[in-house]
Image (tube, helix red, strand yellow):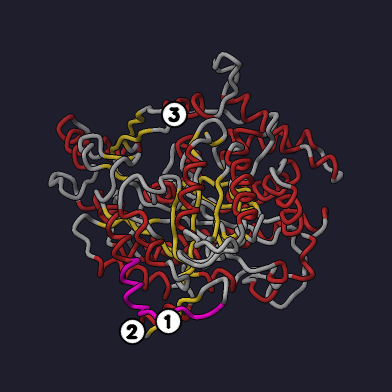
Amino acid sequence: MQKLSLSKNALLILEHRYLKKNENGKVVEGPGNMFRRVARNIAKPDARYGGNAKKTEQEFYDLMVSLDFLPNSPTLLNAGRKLQQLAACFVLPIEDDISSIFKTLHDAALIHKTGAGTGFNFSRLRPKGDMIESSGFTSGPVSFMKVFDAATGQIKLGGTLRGANMGILNASHPDIEEFITIKSKENVLTNFNVSVAITDKFMQAARKNKNYSLENPRTKKIEKKESAKRIFRLICGQAWLNGDPGVIFIDRINEFNQTPKLGKIESTDSCGEQPLLPYEACNLGSINLSNMADGKKINFERLKKIVHSAVHFLDNVIDMCQYPLEENKKIVYKNRKIGLGVMGFADMLIKLGIAYDSQDGLNAAEKIMKFISKEASIASLELAGKRGAFPEWKNSVYNKKSKYFKGCHMPLRNATRTTIAPTGTISIIADVSSGIEPLFALSYARRTAEGKTLIYFNEELKKSLKENYMYNDEIIDKINKEGSLKNIDEIPDKLKKIFVVGSDIAPEWHVRMQAAFQKYVDNGISKTVTLPKDATVEDVEKIFMMAYELGCKGISVYRYGSREGQVIYLSSKRDEQITLSGFLRR
């Protein structure tokens, strides 16, 4: 039986957000009880497939209590409770008529109240000033985004958080300039991340300083030609200003669409890491890589066991989830997509003595993600043997794209297996770094949605300072002030190299790290390139182009100090607040 050990910050976030409360708001469930509730609920499908549900319950309980793996927040919140909606990611379609627009708004509200986020592509909506049937003129997609934003703001996500959306517009839409600049002012579309969907053709035109076509989605006619380079620079300039928009490389995403006969992928979920078909949903979970460091080596035997248990867990979640819409259930059951990812990668590198911004860091990323991806595919293959393949397997193109099963026809249980999510709150529970991000700072404060402030000081650094006889008030005060070791002269270079934080890392290393993981991730990756305050628009252009060239599926940036009201900040510099990654993207 695994022993549960949680930090003070983890206990605080669990109490405020996850644990059961009675009608008076009093907590009536302990953390261990929560994990038991989730394990018991998620183990139930095993009985249906001829397995031992009681044995599986203990396996899943140990998996979570050890903090080796945690599922996405809706599963922790809702499993074994009345709501029973367990998926984190949804994409909803929007057609060019008022009934479709407001049906989607209604559907999004049902999803938000269960604790999940939604993504939309508004590109089918006719442009601003275009004719409508009543002889009037439409106000365009951006105006309808504001309607969605206002509605989302009135709904508490799962009763704990504000709802989050992804709004996407194709670069070829006539209203693309309005879309790119919509968040240039504060407090506009505050419940949205926004991203521009960019094609290979657009990127080639931007490289060669050529024009591209803006097309009316209603008439399919070209409205005008535009300079791709100018629009690309406008995107980069706005991202430099306040972090939005990001970009998604839509052709690359569809290149890895395993079931194209069901439709094209047009959007991602609210944090950008999960491309999905219209109405599709996906449940996610993350392996704690910090726990996989065994001395100065990675314990691959332990990791293999966890991957197989986690794939089993996430496949069961599909069966136990009560989807808000019948359309969700229908397509989810056709593809059975899951998204197994990681958290605590930066912590793992520190324990291994490897610098994040180094070739060794990139090599470690590729090695560990290749292993996880391969074992996740094997686990899915084994489940297919016991439970059957996902129904669209025969119509899929998986065997053409797979790095492990290329050219063969072995059926898998899940159309996709891996995704790297932001792990915002579950990384607090596990007390590790988020996703594949570097450490934000070695000492910092984080403001929660409930208005609480959580204080952090890196435990591995504390241990190393004590080993080097440097753990004293003067050093601690300097670290609290700086958040980094970079400008503290007394700290030896060997520690500065290993205990690197996001602001210490050159932007290209952020991109290279994302690309290293993307090689072995089925879906996408939530990752933000952190830029220094004095970065230029040209720096952003280089980053976006580099991300495209290295095979990323999307990219977002954040320039230090460029937006107010973020949730993570150096405790001594509250006037310069910063998120870990991408504002809502976290």
Earlier along the polypeptide chain: callout 3 or callout 1? Answer: 3
Mark 3 vs mark 1: in front: 1
Residue contact between numbered discs 1 and 2, judged by CB atoms under 8 Å: no
Residue contact between numbered discs 3 and 2, judged by CB atoms under 8 Å: no
Give the spatial CA distance, label 1 vs label 2: 10 Å
In the image, which residues are magenta? 220-235
Q: State the image coordinates of residue 84 (x, y, percent, origin top left).
A: 69, 35
User: Is residue 357 a member of the stretch shown in magenta?
Assistant: no
Q: Residues within 10 Å of mark 1 (few under 14, many from 20)?
A: many
Give the spatial CA distance, label 3 vs label 2: 53 Å
Q: Which residue occupies 83% across, 54% down?
A: 386
**Could you tell me which secondary element the residue under label 3 belongs to?**
loop
Residue most extreme to the left: 489
Residue 212: assigned label: 1
Q: Residues within 10 Å of mark 3 (few under 14, many from 20)?
A: few
Q: Amino acid at mark 3?
A: Ser
Q: State the image coordinates of residue 419 (x, y, percent, origin top left).
A: 56, 56
Mark 1 vs mark 2: in front: 1
Q: State the image coordinates of residue 516 (x, y, percent, origin top left).
A: 45, 66
Look at the picture and state if 31 lies above or below 157: above
Q: State the image coordinates of residue 585 (x, y, percent, origin top left).
A: 44, 50
Residue receiving disc 3: 7
Residue receiving disc 2: 209
User: Is residue 223 a member of the stretch shown in magenta?
Assistant: yes
| Quadrant in the picture for the N terminus | top right
Q: Which residue occupies 38% across, 62% down?
A: 178
Q: Residues within 10 Å of mark 2 (few under 14, many from 20)?
A: few
Q: Amino acid at mark 2?
A: Asn
Q: Which residue occupies 47% across, 46% down?
A: 149
Look at the picture and state if 515 lies above or below 3: below
- Res 475 visible: yes
Q: Is residue 27 left or right of residue 469?
A: right
